[in-house]
Amino acid sequence: MEEYILNSDEEEIKRFSKLSGEWWKENGAFAPLHRITPIRIEFILKAVNDGQEYSTDEERPLKNLNIIDVGCGGGILSEPLKRLGASITGIDASETAIQSARLHSRKSNLEINYLVGTIDSLIEQKKLYDLVIASEVIEHVQDPNDFIKGLKKLVLPKGKIILTTLSRSLKSFLIAKVAAEYLTKIIPVGTHEWKKFLNPQELETLLASDGFRVDFIKGMTYKIKSDRFVLSDDLSMNYAIAATYFESTTI
Ligand SMILES: C[S@@+](CC[C@H](N)C(=O)[O-])C[C@H]1O[C@@H](n2cnc3c(N)ncnc32)[C@H](O)[C@@H]1O
């Protein structure tokens, strides 16, 4: 059995573990994750509705879906997904992140199955999900190719994968690295290793080589005027990608 545990970068996990008190502070170290959550949800709803907008009358649009949030951290994304009706498992290699997630979900009165670890234990148990999400995680793993291969093993045939990450561009270097970490100090120094970022085309190629058909990609762009993030066609900074898994024989 392949060991995906090797794919978690110990230094990265230690860094996240030290920040465990920050997960639910809206203006703390994870502020950017809170800020992009509404559009992450918008993107996810669109992806599970095959690219169409959801009717806002539907209160629990994810009610029939079994979702795994890989690298869920403190549960910033898991909680709204649960509120939308999903059955949700959150897994993270950082024990303290999961402690924070469990504590907060209890306060929020939400039943979420939080697990400490990497996905290898789930693969071993042959767990399968309708939707596998890894949001802002792939840029923190040792080998993205291996990571995708592991995630693939958790997706039901014709199930979906959604990844969000940062593009490796001059803009992301200047904004996500230089400005966010050093000039404005919005996020702690060392949060990102720019060289690890994948461009949309690179991620598309990795997904395609593992039996996924990319459904659509959207940029997650900050608009100064309205002081919020919107889904856009600008893929040079943060972006989200949705793909459907077809076993290699049926693609
Ligand atoms: C930037 S945070 C994103 C948290 C969450 N997905 C969100 O967007 O709110 C990255 C998280 O991925 C976790 N992580 C990194 N590599 C991992 C791996 N191989 N397996 C599980 N978790 C991992 C880290 O511990 C950290 O909590």
Image (tube, rainbow, N blue to C red):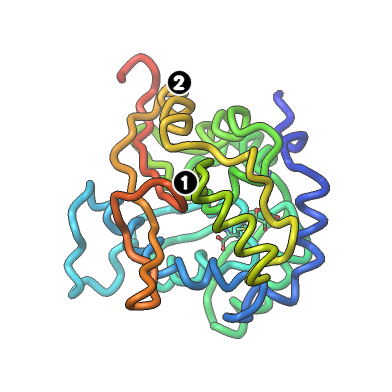
For the residues marked 1 and 2, what is the alpha-carbon distance in whole angstroms?
16 Å
Instruction: Pick the residue in front: 219 or 209.
Output: 219
Q: Residue at x 78, y 60 (%)?
A: 95
Question: Which mark is on residue 109?
Answer: none
Name the residue type under label 2: Ser
Q: Secondary structure at mark 1?
A: strand
| Position of the N terminus by quadrant | top right
Q: Is residue 38 above or below residue 90?
A: below
Which one is earlier in the sequence, the residue at label 1 or at label 2?
A: 1
Name the residue type under label 1: Leu
Expressed as whole percent of the image width and height from the top left, the position of residue 222 reads: 40, 65
Q: Is residue 186 above or below residue 233?
A: below
Total residue callouts: 2
Q: Residue at x 32, y 59 (%)?
A: 231
Instruction: Pick the residue in front: 222 or 116.
Output: 222
Q: Is residue 133 above or below residue 56?
A: above
Which picture quadrant has residue 215?
top left
Q: Is mark 2 within 8 Å of ligand 1?
A: no
- For the question of whether residue 155 can be seen, the reply is yes
